Amino acid sequence: MTDTLDTTDAATLDPARREMYEKVCAKLNPDRFRDLLVDLVNIHSPTGRERPASEYMASYLQENVGIDARYQPISEHTGNAIGELRGSGGGSRLLLYAPIDTHIDPEADVPWVGKSLRPDMTPEAKVDGDLVIGLGASNPKCMVAGLTEVLHAVVDADLPLVGDLAIGFAGGGMPVSMSNRDQVGMSSGVFHLLTHGMMPDHAIVLKPWWAVYPEEPGMCWFKVTVRGTFGYAGISRGTEGFRSSIVPAATVIQEIEAWLPEYTARNTSGSTLPEGWISAVRSGSPDKPAFPSAATEIYLDVRVNPRTTPGEVRHQFAEMIRALRTRHPDIELDWEMYGSLPGGMTDPDNWIIQSCQRGWEEVEGKPYESTPLLGGQTDGTLIRRLGIPCARIGYPWPPASAPAELNEGLGGMGVASVTDVMMATRAIAYAVVDTLTRTREELDL
């Protein structure tokens, strides 16, 4: 290897950097990745209860990978795993990031996730050839294991890094707000991570889809309450003074459902496709079926293009409600926006976006031409909103070889292909070498 690095052309790796990159790729170990993924799937980490998984990863980073790492507590039950490999100095700080919490709690979520729990919905890992199956195997556990494998390979390759390679795995990453767990969720963990010492110059988020995204949507959560009167099943239909809240709620649901595709079409731009879905309906008590409820609540998540503010989305929703009231003056309702997070974006010409695209091209062996539309939200949104240039890169999902019954709907996001994720690790390794072997001046920092 030469003693000096050629910095004249960032579009391709010069011989010295290519030698380093190939050395890292030679150290990437799919068996080691798979074994860590199995261990992580077997550690249940629902949002707000991530401490055991984060503590495990902090120990793994320190004891197995051999870097300075620790558990970063947030509360008694939740916290983050953080670590860092320092370079010689004068370079940038690059954060490899993934959340660590899963969206299903098997003890509480049946029947809402299905009549019973499928193998991809339980925190019990099963290995089937190239596949690892279990709750969160593809999202987020293989992301955590995949980034750890990149870091492990860099350490094993003993590269002469100039910049610092940081790694972080946070709780509270799911787009939820757990009312019974200190309202953990909506990127609460990564916010704590970044505001407590882990702020980098740029970041890479590993998340499904084999593409490089410079932007991601935010979200607005709405609750619509249809009003009626409290009733009794023995009352004759048409009795004066009784109004159902449940029956007219069906009309309101249909009106919202008709509006959502119009909203998406009107607000699609860049690589963001801001979908919206009705996700929950609540009314009355199953213990009191004889007494119809005076209120029926409808909950929905509407995604926010980073070029549109939550305030603007709220206005568009308000206009839809106003038109609905005009068409259905007999329906009494009120509404509120009870949660919001703006979208975030990074300049597509920023170094870290371009470097990840070069990594994608290296693996694919062809030019990176376009980024497909996407509506999925990740912690990358908040990372960008805090002013950190951030690239999202991932792997094909769902795996083509996954059983059809486990690809139905979102499921437990629990089928990961070792081959697919290892492909993504090679692209990320490229960006690590490409970025952390340069001075801050070379990176325009």
Image (cartoon, rainbow, N blue to C red):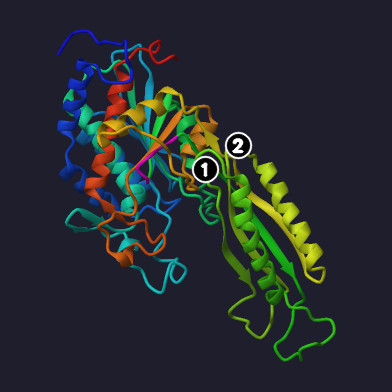
State the image coordinates of residue 250 (x, y, percent, origin top left).
66, 72
Residue 332 vs residue 9, the one in the foreground: 9
- Tell me the chief SS of the magenta region: loop
22 within the magenta span: no
Q: Position of residue 58 (x, y in %)?
A: 31, 38
Q: Nearer the viewer, residue 349 or 158?
A: 349
Q: Quadrant of the N terminus?
A: top left
User: At 19% across and 53% down in the image, what residue appears?
Assistant: 130
Residue appearing at x 34%, y 54% in the figure = 136
Secondary-structure class at tag 2: loop
The single residue placed furthest to the right in the displayed view is 240
* Whether label 1 touches label 2, CB < 8 Å: yes
Task: Write down the quadrant of residue 329 in the picture.
Answer: bottom right
Residue hosting label 1 = 272
Mark 2 = which residue? 307
Closer-to-camera residue (359/126): 359
Location of residue 445 with respect to 240 vertically, above or below: above
Specify the amino acid type for callout 2.
Arg
Residue 212 highlighted magenta (yes or no): yes
> As drawn, is 327 to the left or to the right of 345?
right
Magenta segment boundaries in residue numbering: 209-213
- Eyeballing the image, is 333 above or below 304? below
Q: Is residue 314 visible?
A: yes
The quarter of the image holding the C terminus is: top left
Q: Residue most toward the top?
A: 4
The crowding category of the residue bearing disc 2, from other C-alpha atoms within 10 Å (few below 14, some 14 to 19, many at least 20), is: some
Q: Is residue 59 visible?
A: no
Q: Which labelled disc corresponds to residue 106?
A: none
Q: Dot 1 surroundings within 10 Å: few (below 14), some, or many (20 or more)?
A: many
